[in-house]
Amino acid sequence: MFRKVITTDDLDSINIAVIHTLQELGIQEVQHAKYCDETFLKIKKAQIDAEPFDLLISDLSFKNDHRNEKLQSGEELIRAVKVAQPNLKVLVYSIEDKTHRLKNLIENEGINGYVLKGRNSIPELKKAIQSIYSNDTVFISPSIANQIGDKSMLEIGNYDIELLKALSKGFTQDEIVHQFKNNKIVPCGSSSIEKRINKLKIFFRANNNAHLITITKDLGLI
């Protein structure tokens, strides 16, 4: 089993529950933090002391307060950690259930597990830790794993990226039609573009075009 683990969440109750779970698994040393910057500094110090952590358990969303944080999200923390200590195992423990965000974490950020917070999340958390320690497969909570495997889910391609970029520049739908025609991007009809924008809003759970752009920028898609 892992010897040294660090967990980060901005809620004390979550940190306490995770720490208790780790202790039940017999993990010798457990540290915790409420801020991403603090977590990263602890990981770096552990490396300098030649006593590195074996596993990071992190939330994705952290509320802003009076502190000026360089790393403001779980994704930013994971990205920084993977550069500083590439072999560190990472388990995300979050209430976030958007499949596109999870796919990005698995495919681009190299996480080792994802547990969805909920009523039965502690048993899943134990399974995830044991699974990550025992093998190289990515552990995903069954409830959200089913969504990832759903073939009806929208796939984001180059066409969608170009469409989102155009929206982010403030282009109107008519201007996008004109731009796509000039650049020979198809489909370029007004109806097709409108339908695709609506599908993207549904997929990303966006209330309007501005919200859609904010979400996709946060995800690093544009």
Image (cartoon, rainbow, N blue to C red):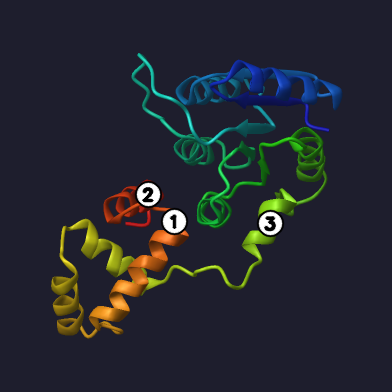
- Judging by the rendered image, the residue that carries numbered circle 3 is 145
Can you give x and y, in whole percent of width and height, for residue 182 in the image?
Answer: 14, 83
**Which residue is depicted at the point 47% across and 28% down?**
62
* Residue 215: assigned label: 2
Badge 2: how crowded within 10 Å, few (<14), some, or many (20+)?
A: some
Cα distance, mark 2 to mark 3? 22 Å
The crowd level at tag 1 (other Cα within 10 Å; few <14, some 14-19, many 20+) is some
Which mark's residue is nearer the viewer, 3 or 1? 1
Q: Position of residue 66 (x, y in %)?
A: 35, 14
Residue type for callout 3: Ala
Spatial separation of the CA atoms under disc 3 and disc 1: 17 Å
Quadrant holding the N terminus: top right
For the residues bearing labels 2 and 1, Cβ distance under 8 angstroms: yes
Residue 169, image x, y percentages: 17, 58
Which residue is under mark 1?
A: 204
Q: Quadrant of the C terminus?
A: bottom left
Classify residue 200 by image quadrant: bottom left
* Residue 138 seen in this snapshot: no
Percent of width and height locating residue 204: 44, 56
Name the kind of residue labelled 1 in the image.
Phe
State yes or no: discs 2 and 3 in contact (Cβ < 8 Å).
no
Which SS class for mark 1? Answer: loop
Q: Residue at image x 78%, y 26%?
A: 3
- In the rendered image, which quarter is residue 87 located in? top right
Q: Which three-letter amino acid code belongs to the residue tagged 2?
A: Ile
Sort mark 3 into few (<14), some (14-19) or many (20+) by Cα contacts within 10 Å: some
Secondary structure under tag 2 reads helix
Mark with earlier residue (2, 3): 3
- Give me the C-alpha separation between circle 2 and circle 1: 7 Å
- What residue appears at the point 57 percent right and 33 percent down from the top-left corner? 59
Q: Is residue 25 left or right of residue 66?
A: right
Which callout, 3 or 1, points at the residue further toward the start of the chain?
Answer: 3
